[in-house]
Structures are given as structure tokens and as C-alpha cells.
Amino acid sequence: MAWRSCFVLLGLTRQGVLRSSAKEGRWHFTIQQRCGFKKATRKPESKRVVPEEPGPPHTESSEAAIQRRTPAPQWDQQAPSGPPRAFGRLFRPLVFTVGFTGCAFGSAAIWQYESLKSRVQSYFDEIRADWLEKLQPQKRGDVRKEVNQWWNNLSDGQKTVTGIIAANAIVFCCWRVPSLQRSMIRYFTSNPTSKTLCSPMLLSTFSHFSFFHLAANMYVLWSFSSSAVSMLGREQFMAVYLSAGVISTFVSYVSKMATGRFGPSLGASGAIMAILAAVCTKMPEAKLAIIFLPMFTFTAANALKAIVAMDTAGLVLGWKFFDHAAHLGGAMFGIWYVLFGHELIWKNREPFVKIWHNFRTRGGPGRGGDQGGAM
């Protein structure tokens, strides 16, 4: 099976630490003070003791000037200077990661149960729709008919990731609204020094500030969606994707706490790396190609090894442009799930599905079995 996927290494990015221009303003202000005329020793001492009095006006003016030049948000506002490397702050994110992963796979099992149950009803609905269309045929130029035709031509994987791409596009547009900047930085960027730790672990997976970052990640997700969904099914695919986003963020938290390299991160790269690693592990001999160099092909196994090696080197050497820990966390989860997780989690969902089935058929207190089943 040959793929022409966008396998651009730069596409799977997760933005790392971005320094605030406000800090640059303070640094230039300090240099100007040091380069002034030398007077009595009291003046520099008084300025060093109380640096806050002249600081805010100069900081605000520099931030305002930078904001007029570029719409980039002030990332360092939520990261305190010299944050404590306390691993106790990771307890809540750990509990959230475990709980969310369990809920994701439990919801996926219920979703699959309900989908199988509604297939018979959908079959009769389709027959009725075809009969009504013959009685009242639509016009050729009907936009709704064109959209339905386009949708029906998509594969199951492409239909599954369409919602994910739409959510990422909406969040990308929200970054362009100045009044939402504070909320976006707080809830849609993950940072272990932030006051909000848990919800950004999921929300940052749908967050992209750069258009190239968004386009590259979504193209890779679109390219691998058909193979991943055909291998896992849409319900299991969604559970793996969302869980990988949270798990990769938690790995990023641990890495930042261990190394002291704090800063906000955002992007779907961790979740996409899990899907990519799962497909490459399941089908290592599949052929991949770079979009700009389609004449050069390589196996999926070699591509996965190269990406893992690059992210490992970036983590060890301290490269700051990408969040390499999140990449490795997503890749390791994808490999583990294909080798062991599918057997441990998905194939043992039957007891949980039986509990849900009994709840649905009984319909709870005061309701008949038929009414509960037709919910």
C-alpha cells in the first residue's frame, strides 16, 4: 500500500517557549541605566532597591509599541519568573490524564454500541429518503445536494477528522481576536507554571497560533486519517487521538519540571504523532513520501525511527523551537497502544458495554424496557 502523505518533519511542530517583548524592554532599560553618567553610589543603589517604580510605565509603553507591530500574544504573562520546580504540582495533571483517558475509551465503547444499535434504523431511514427523493427530485444546482455528494465521496477516516480540523480552525480564528488573548493564553496553551493546569492539557491540542503550524498538522492528520480509521475504527480512533493529546501534554509537563525550561506549548502534534506512530508500527513496510519530494520514498518504520531520533536529540540538546517531549510522549503512546494497549483496553471493554446495555434496556426507574431502548 503506497501513500503520498505529507510527511514533513517540520509539519509536526509543537511551539515551545516564546519570550515576551516586555522583558526585552526591561533589558534595554537596564542597559541604558548602566551606560549613563557615573554619579554618587546612592543613585544606582536606590534604583536597584526599588526597580518597580520606573518599571511599569516603560514596560507598558514597550508592549504597546510591539503590539502595534505584530499581533503575537505576550506568552510570558502567565509564567512567573523563576518558577519552583515542584513535582507536586503534577499530581492533579496525572489524575486528570488517567481519568480522561478512561473516560475517552469508555465513551468510545458506548459510542460504538449505539452506532451498531442504530444501523437498522438508519437502513430504513435511507430507504425512505431515496423514496422521497424520487417523488421530489432536487434541482441540479442545489447546494445541499452538492455538499452531500462531496461528503459521501469522503472516506470514513476523512469524515472522522473533518470535525477535528474544523475545531482547530475555529480556535485559530479565536487567536486573532484581541479581546480573547488572555483567555486563549490561559486555557489554550499548556504550561506547568500556569494556575490552570488540567483543561489546557486537552484544549491546547486544538490550538495553533501560526497558520503554517495549523496547515502542516492538519494536512498530516488528513493524510493518515483513512489508514488509521480503517485500522482502529472511528470510535477507537477518537479515543486514541484525544487521549494522546492529554498524555503528550503531561509528558511535556514532566520534562519542563525536570529540566526547568518553562514556557507555554500548543498544537496537535502530540496527538498526531500518536496516530502516525500507530500506523507506522502496524504497517512498517508501507511506503511514504515527502510532499515536495515525491520521487523519494521510504518505509514507515524508517520514517518513525528518524522522527523519534530527531525528537530525542532535541530533548537532550535542549532545542527550544519544538516541544520534543510532547512529540516523544505521543509517539510512545501510539507505539504502546498498537503493541499492548489494544489488547489491554479495547478488547476488554465487554463488561463495561454490558453494564451500559443493561442500563439502556432497563431505562432506569419508572421506565419500561422498550422506552429505555428507544432512547
Image (cartoon, grey):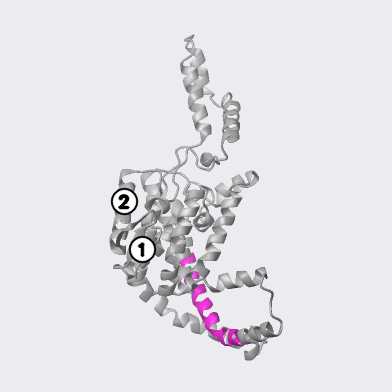
Tell me which segment is drawn in magenta.
100-124
Residue at (58% x, 73% y) in the render: 149
Say which residue appears at 57% left-offset and 54% top-offset.
Answer: 171
Q: Secondary structure at mark 1?
A: helix
* Quarter in which the N terminus is drawn: bottom left
Q: Is residue 18 visible?
A: yes
Amino acid tagged 2: Met
Please tell me which residue is depicted at 46% across the width and 17% down the height of the picture: 34
Q: Nearer the viewer, residue 188 or 56?
A: 188
Residue 127 appears at what percent x and percent y? 62, 87
CB atoms at circles 1 and 2 under 8 Å apart?
no
What separation in Å lies between label 1 and label 2 (alpha carbons)?
14 Å
Residue placed under numbered mark 1 in the picture: 277
Q: Where does the image place residue 130, in percent across and percent down from the top left?
A: 63, 84
In the displayed structure, 284 sits above or below 293; it is below
Magenta stretch: includes residue 108: yes
Q: Is residue 54 above or below residue 290?
A: above
- In terms of secondary structure, where does tag 2 sit? helix
Q: How many marks?
A: 2
Quadrant position of residue 269: bottom left
* Residue 98 appearing in the image: no
The kind of secondary structure the magenta stretch mainly shows is helix
Q: Earlier in the sequence, mark 1 or mark 2?
A: 1
- Which residue was labeled with disc 2? 310
